[in-house]
Image (cartoon, coloured by chain):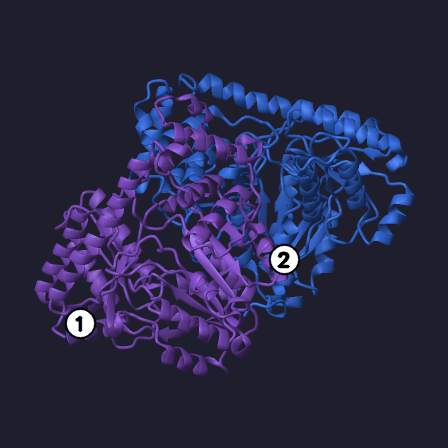
Chain colours: A blue, B purple
């Protein structure tokens, strides 16, 4: 029997994030509107998390054309589709067993796609070698991360594996670490310095954590989710040196590597920095880097595919990565093929090149203009302050709440920022993410706002925030 | 750091199935051939597991057409595609957030598809009610099963959750149970009775297991993977009564429900039988039934989607199913849409109906003729005997090995049936599955042979087996 008292205690212990509760409320309100309820808004706008196509961002034509042909190979003959689309589809179908996207693939992914990814990484990192055998494809970034977390997980209480985790972090991460059976060891990012990683804070956190768990890994999100911070070479190097000295595995979420828009900033991968460091580092520091089809430019969240590259990991350990991926049998083939298209886009001279380039550029421009516009707006609202973002798809403004709301939240036994988000949602139909993730609070409140949306949508969100503010729900700092 | 000695002990404990080892050998041989090595065969034919499209079975045109339109909505205007295809694609796109298959869906699946599935189950079961809220979509059957196993898992050693598992069982199941952290409690199916479930054996197994673990569930595969057995009403009823008396959750793999070909047999679902039983059963016995897009008729393994229906499970427990599905964020949308097409195919009068019906019929005919042909062939080979299969996609013949092979296997420290499969693979290029899954052996040997392949392929496999036999690798029973 599967009765409540018998449910796996670890599963019962997975924290319920405020995000889920807000999502449920948003769904209720949307349902009410559908059933004819009168509200001061037409629809719920959910910008609490990234979902570009839901938000009206258009898919990349080249990706969709190639995938349609792969699903329906009779389209290979359609002259109305560009030649490079048909050639690419043919090549990808040749890489599928039986020439069908309906066949299983190896659990770690199609070799053809893993090779494309390795080549992409080498181009990106100025020639630092990358090998298909070190690239593992999975049903999205979270799933790949879960595989590594499961590998690392062991012990209970003070012997349990600990993972140093930035605060704030991606909102889905804490529940994943709970489910994986590791201890989340929070380290605070420096808001005043644009949410940079602070070395002293890392050392201090680690010192306190030791004895309470066994820290074995550090999670990094760069470009930062949800902070928008983008690390420079020096900062990355320092984190690598810290990981090396403390023998921590680096888990680097580089999902938003394609969306850096801060002036003078560029995306630098941890791997690139590592391989320009001394051999004591480049040959020993263990690194797992993650990327995803749900990235800003592709935005193909629904196709579900991501990958990770493992660096300096013992082949015998890698074997267990394969073992764990085997339970999932294989990653959706349409997603795997889309990964190939992401890392190997049309080249100059290809028929699809111009359209592809324009579409990518449009997303980039939308993102950087939205960031600019929203930052300025938020910083002009009394009761809000927002660090400048340099990349990624979120802003993470600070919220200065009046004491009435904080008191009311205490009585309702809910976090004050969650209460704010609930009220905003009910009053304006705008769903933002609440910064409080963990029950524990620094006494500061923040909001998570996805800016990968159409400019008109952003204006509606900002108008909602502005008029909600005017009703006095924030206080001056 | 993630060094070998720190790898999660549970992950290190996942058993390596002989299947994986044979797959690696098959891949090596295929690679050798590609590099020009001379072999007495042109290619490796792998019939050790089901992968219909790899084996040359054609995808269902209607499914591929609708999915192609969903990926590339400009095809909605293509008059060359049947109207019902375009209408269905439009309806499915309307059910996707933002009208795109690139958007996330709810973690438990798209409501539209869950409703279609519930309606399908009601039609299948003669009106027994089914509700979308009890249907959970996941990245394939294995993934859905893993969610339930994780829920059930608790304790260590004699307090660890046990799952009664048929021997033989699906070859991927033991590793899944290991990873999930539950104890596999084997119960023997009755080969002499066409691999039927035996009640005395169940009682005996349970009695022995208690005290060594906490049995909480029983796994059933019907139609049987890999046995080909199909349970009748009475047998199902007995198992339900046993589960009720012993307070076991029924985990019913009904993935091959669309492929029953035994004369006078039809697929009967556990749920249907349960709901015709007395209320003491129908209102209390907990049941989870699984189905998959990788089923025989669809064969869309690469799209990765499956679902489970939960019956008589406490809503508070169901909540944790949602929690666990959340880690995967959402199931691939192309797979979810294909599930909708599987459970809601073209109807008489629809333009695609005739083609669809012919394609489904062709697969069914291939399967039943292949089963007939292979059974007869195997039963005529001295050293082999095969129970008649009534459904599913496998045959599971018994292999009578000469003592030399058994002795040789002992010296090589490998199971004798695995050695036989290795030799067959190296000599004839035919890859079959080995029955020994668990180290422990009943002293009997079996082979797993997928018959969902083109008839010509089957002939090559049988010819390989026949001539391999002639070289004396089997003995008379």
User: Going by the image, does A150 lie left or right of B186?
Assistant: right
Q: Which subunit holds the residue at mark 1?
A: B
Q: CA distance from mark 2 to mark 1?
A: 49 Å
Taking A92 as reference, is B230 above or below it? below
Name the spot of residue B342 as percent of width and height, x first: 40, 44
Name the spot of residue A64 as percent of width and height, x first: 45, 28
* Residue at horizontal 65 percent and vertical 34 percent from the top: A232
Pick the quarter of the image with the N terminus of chain B: bottom right
| Front-lying residue, B71 or A226 | B71
Circle 1: is it few (<14), some (14-19), or many (20+) Cα within 10 Å? Answer: many
Taking B52 as reference, is A452 above or below it? above
Name the spot of residue B192 as percent of width and height, x first: 24, 74
Q: Which subunit holds the residue at mark 2?
A: A
User: Going by the image, does B345 lie left or right of A436?
Assistant: left
Quadrant in which residue B435 is drawn? bottom left
Would residue A275 be visible to someone looking at this image? no
Q: Which mark is residue B310?
A: none
Would residue B115 be visible to someone looking at this image? yes
Disc 2 marks which residue? A178
Taking A170 as reference, is B278 above or below it? below
Circle 2: is it few (<14), some (14-19), or many (20+) Cα within 10 Å? Answer: some
Disc 1 marks which residue? B401
* Residue at horizontal 24 percent and vertical 48 percent from the top: B30
* Residue at horizontal 51 percent and vertical 67 percent from the top: B282
Name the spot of residue B203 as percent of width and height, x first: 42, 80
């Amino acid at each position: 029997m599967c009765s409540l008292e018998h449910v796996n205690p670890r599963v019962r212990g997975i924290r319920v994030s405020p995000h889920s509760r807000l999502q449920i409320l948003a769904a209720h309100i949307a349902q009410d509107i559908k059933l004819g309820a009168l509200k001061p808004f037409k629809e719920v706008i959910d910008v609490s998390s990234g979902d570009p196509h839901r938000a009206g961002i258009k898919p990349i034509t080249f990706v969709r054309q190639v995938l349609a042909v792969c699903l329906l190979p009779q389209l290979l003959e359609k002259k109305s589709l560009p030649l490079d689309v048909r050639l690419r589809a043919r090549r990808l179908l040749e890489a599928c067993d039986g020439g069908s996207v309906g066949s299983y693939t190896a659990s770690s992914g199609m070799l053809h796609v893993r090779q494309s990814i390795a080549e992409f990484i080498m181009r990106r990192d100025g020639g630092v070698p990358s090998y298909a055998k070190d690239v593992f494809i999975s049903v999205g970034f979270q799933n790949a991360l879960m595989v590594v977390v499961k590998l690392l997980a062991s012990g209970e209480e003070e012997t349990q594996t600990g993972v140093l985790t930035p605060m704030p972090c991606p909102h889905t991460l804490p529940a994943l670490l709970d489910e994986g059976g590791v201890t989340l060891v929070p380290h605070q990012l420096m808001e005043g310095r644009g949410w940079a990683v602070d070395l002293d804070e890392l050392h201090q956190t680690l010192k306190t954590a030791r004895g309470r768990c066994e820290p074995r890994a550090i999670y990094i999100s760069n470009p930062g989710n949800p902070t928008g911070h983008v690390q420079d070479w020096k900062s990355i190097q320092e984190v690598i040196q810290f990981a090396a000295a403390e023998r921590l595995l680096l888990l680097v979420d580089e999902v938003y590597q394609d969306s850096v828009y801060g002036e003078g900033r560029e995306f630098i991968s941890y791997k690139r920095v590592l391989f320009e460091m001394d051999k004591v580092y480049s040959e020993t520091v263990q690194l797992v880097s993650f990327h995803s089809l749900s990235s800003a430019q592709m935005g193909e969240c629904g196709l579900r595919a991501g990958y990770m590259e493992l660096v300096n990991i013992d082949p015998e350990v890698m074997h267990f990565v394969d073992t764990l991926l085997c339970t999932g049998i294989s990653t959706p083939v349409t997603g795997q093929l889309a990964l190939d298209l992401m890392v190997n886009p049309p080249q100059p001279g290809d028929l699809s090149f111009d359209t592809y380039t324009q579409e990518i550029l449009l997303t980039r421009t939308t993102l950087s203009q939205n960031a600019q516009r929203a930052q300025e707006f938020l910083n002009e609202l009394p009761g809000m302050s927002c660090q400048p973002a340099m990349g990624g798809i979120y802003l993470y403004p600070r919220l200065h709440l009046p004491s009435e709301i904080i008191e009311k939240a205490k009585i309702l036994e809910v976090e004050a920022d969650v209460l704010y988000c609930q009220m905003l949602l009910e009053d304006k139909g705008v769903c933002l993410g609440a910064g409080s993730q963990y029950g524990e609070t620094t006494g500061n409140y923040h909001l998570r706002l996805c800016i990968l949306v159409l400019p008109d949508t952003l204006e509606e969100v900002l108008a909602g925030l502005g008029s909600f503010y005017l009703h006095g729900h924030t206080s001056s700092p």
